[in-house]
Image (tube, helix red, strand yellow):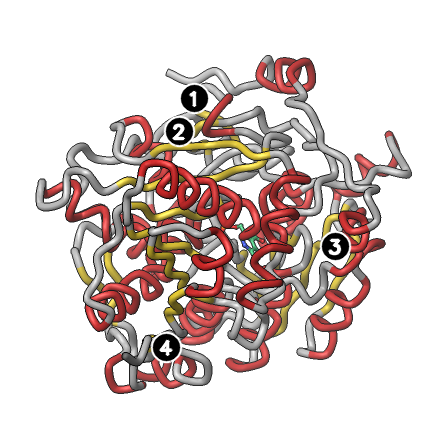
Amino acid sequence: MDKRTKFTLDEKEMPRYWYNIQADLPEPLPPVLHPATGKPVTPDDLAPLFPMELIKQEVSQERYIEIPEELLAVYRTWRPTVLHRAYRLEKALDTPAKIFFKYEGTSQAGSHKPNTAVAQAYYNKKEGVKRLTTETGAGQWGSALSMGGAMFGIEIKVYMVRISYDQKPYRRILMETWGAKCVPSPSEDTKIGREILVKDPDCPGSLGIAISEAIEDAATHEDTKYSIGSVVNHVLLHQTIVGEECRKQMEMADAYPDIIVGNIGGGSNFAGQFLPWIRDKISGAKPDLRIICVEPTAAPSLTKGPYAYDFGDVAGLAPILKMYTLGHTFVPPPIHAGGLRYHGMAPIICHLHKLGLVEARAEHQVGTFQAGVKFARTEGIISAPEPCHNIKVAIDEALRCREAGEAKTILIAHSGHGHFDMAAYDEYLSGRLQDYEYPKEKIEEALAQLPRVG
Ligand SMILES: Cc1ncc(COP(=O)(O)O)c(C=O)c1O
């Protein structure tokens, strides 16, 4: 019997809408607060940062939002992405579990990030914006937005966390090849950057600092707006094309997941996969569906942080969000999964966790690379350090199935390739990679800085 391994959709079958979970939430999201007044933000407050169409999407209660044709044409340059059945991994684990993975590493930038990058470039271009600023950690988001800028003719300025800028020159070169300007953050280009550099000239930077710089730059230039790669509602919305495609592909495979597992940094790739499924859990159609969010032990917001209002950035320029947080001044240990080193989490994911609809688990990095190498040696794909986190949990769940003799269906949200992460694999393979314990004192210090609201 033929064992179908890849489930591919024709371009014509690509979904023509994004799914908006806000229409189906059992309780509405807590309001977003203004960083200066502590009052709920209005669309006008957000107008200096984002184009109006994205602000509308941020608060929309419509269940489906149509993807414009011009954008679909760009999506078609790499979408639909493939759903794979991981037969070789199943065999190596000797598990009765059926393992599937939906792979976003085939986009031009190598991850799920272009799903929102091209959408944001499109809406900004449509509203006459000439230039976008953003932050990037390991460089995945910065490169995705650079590609989006190239496709829609918008100038891109990327503030890249200094430590990654120094360690990952190839990501910077990628951004420059797509025509973007990339500077190490903290930089001399903003007031907040200069202030930090005076206090600490060797500051390694953090996502929180880079966000502050990018927001300040956008707020002080007339033709410029700010673009964000995760956390906020409209970014998660754009990513739902992944889960919407996947539902069709799982149907082709005559399967429905018992467990969906993904990594969460700001939450966008995993939400993009699981939001279109969680509506079945909310409606009561699939009450037993398990959704497992995986984060690093070094930055354990969902597993260890309090659910509180906090700033999205270090300087307190970004709106205040209700989220599981480690404190906006927390600088996580230098794990290789740069995309998972954020102090907060998407409010939508936090809300669903609070409602008991998603689970969370934290993993140490050495175990995740061990899982990533197993995946590479069975399925052939070299994964980015971020998806190695959920591959580890998928393997653990598949081994549990072996013990229990259960043929569960496990769906992995695979967010990208690791071709620029060879130094991390080298550290792992040579036994130099280390785990970081939960930095309790540092987190307590940062939590003391939470804004007072209400
Ligand atoms: C490959 C990859 N996976 C996951 C993430 C985590 O971000 P998010 O939780 O928004 O998907 C990143 C962020 O940079 C990434 O590059």
Sequence-wise, which precedes: disc 1 or disc 3? 1
**Which label belongs to residue 425?**
3
For the N terminus, the quadrant is bottom left
**Which label belongs to residue 80?**
4
- Dot 1 surroundings within 10 Å: few (below 14), some, or many (20 or more)? some
Sequence-wise, which precedes: disc 3 or disc 2? 2
Sequence-wise, which precedes: disc 2 or disc 4? 4
Q: CA distance from mark 3 to mark 2?
A: 36 Å
Pointer 1 residue = 308
Q: Nearer the viewer, residue 375 or 197?
A: 375
For the C terminus, the quadrant is top left
**Which label belongs to residue 322?**
2
Q: CA distance from mark 4 to mark 3?
A: 29 Å
* Nearest-to-viewer mark from 4 and 1: 4
The x, y position of residue 160, in whole percent, is: 72, 54
Above-or-below relation of 374 to 312: below
Left or right: residue 451 versus residue 412 is: right
- Dot 3 surroundings within 10 Å: few (below 14), some, or many (20 or more)? many
Q: CA distance from mark 2 to mark 4?
A: 33 Å
The x, y position of residue 439, in whole percent, is: 67, 21
Q: Is residue 421 visible?
A: yes
Q: CA distance from mark 1 to mark 3?
A: 36 Å
Question: At label 4, which amino acid type do we have?
Answer: Pro
Q: Nearer the viewer, residue 318 or 297?
A: 297
Contact? badges 1 and 2 (CB < 8 Å): yes
